[in-house]
Image: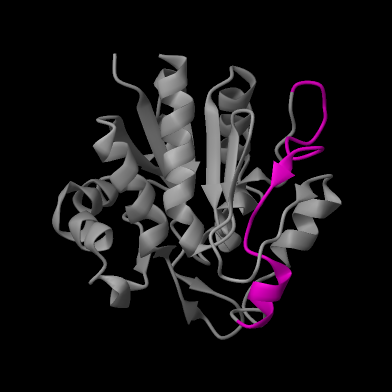
């Protein structure tokens, strides 16, 4: 059977005191999606609320993988995202959470999401996220009571990058929060590609890292077959 990947997306469309418009950052979903497609994986979408999610960075649509996502089945299927609590997550080999600022709004504390991530991780499924997506890993506790990120090698959008991007909009600094829960944080040069696999946990720093995250997920799942 072909591996099954569930892409879990935020439903937020604005953030911060100025209600900055946001959503899922297009290349952070489109580039990994392209890698999953090339590997012939089954790809499904779930959102926290089961409502149609939002996309950001549509100005980057001239990128080949972004354009294929928008005009092919990717965006169409993302619009049909199931409600996470109604998905049988046990049937998936991997869950992937793309970034954009949207996850910073609704993914830090969502109880259903935390339960799903812990369940997938503890049965040795792949858990992956990129850019602001690793906010989904915050507050995930494993069955022994420890934080999932404690002692794990992690990358996410960095304090340096946020300083020049959306510091006034985000509710907290992601690098600081992950480190506070014990993550071994790896920050590369701002806006450079940086993706890390620590066992079955895969994370990436920014939009440039999304393709690498997708490639690492594919490599892990193919090595299991």
Classify residue 123 by image quadrant.
top right
In magenta, the rendered stretch is 143-164
User: How many numbered markers are drawn?
Assistant: 0
Q: Is residue 119 left or right of residue 208?
A: right
Look at the picture and state if 54 lies above or below 90: below
Which of the pair 176/199 is nearer the observer?
A: 199
Classify residue 141 by image quadrant.
top right
**Which residue is rendered at x = 64% and y = 28% of the image?**
199
Q: Is residue 180 left or right of residue 159?
A: right
**Which residue is rendered at x = 65% and y = 74% of the image?**
162
Q: Is residue 204 visible?
A: yes
Magenta residues: mostly which secondary structure? loop
In x, y percent, where is residue 59? 30, 78
In x, y percent, where is residue 185? 76, 52
In x, y percent, where is residue 160? 70, 74
Magenta-span inclusion, residue 155 = yes
Look at the picture and state if 119 lies above or below 190: above
In x, y percent, where is residue 50? 37, 46
Q: Is residue 168 left or right of residue 80?
A: right
Toward the bottom, the furthest residue is 18
Q: Quadrant of the C terminus?
A: top left
**Which residue is rendered at x = 62% and y = 63% of the image?**
157
């Amino acid at each position: 059977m072909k591996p099954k990947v569930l892409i879990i997306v935020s439903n937020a469309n604005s953030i911060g005191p100025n209600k900055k418009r946001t959503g899922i950052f297009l290349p952070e979903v489109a580039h990994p999606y392209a890698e999953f497609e090339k590997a012939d994986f089954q790809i499904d979408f779930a959102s926290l609320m089961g409502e149609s999610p939002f996309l950001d960075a549509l100005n980057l649509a001239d990128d080949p993988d972004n354009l294929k996502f928008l005009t092919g089945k990717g965006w169409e299927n993302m619009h049909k995202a199931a409600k996470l609590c109604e998905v049988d997550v046990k049937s998936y080999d991997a869950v992937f959470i793309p970034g954009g600022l949207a996850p910073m709004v609704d993914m830090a504390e969502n109880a259903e999401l935390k339960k799903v991530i812990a369940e997938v991780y503890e049965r040795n499924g792949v858990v992956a996220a990129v850019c602001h997506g690793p906010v989904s890993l915050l507050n995930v506790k494993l069955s022994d009571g420890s934080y999932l990120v404690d002692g794990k090698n992690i990358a996410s959008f960095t304090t340096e990058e946020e300083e020049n991007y959306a510091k006034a909009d985000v509710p907290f600094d992601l690098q600081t929060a992950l480190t506070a829960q014990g993550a071994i944080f790896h920050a590369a040069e701002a806006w450079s590609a940086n993706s890390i696999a620590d066992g079955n946990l895969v994370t990436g720093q920014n939009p440039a890292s999304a393709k690498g995250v997708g490639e690492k997920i594919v490599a892990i799942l193919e090595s299991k077959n």
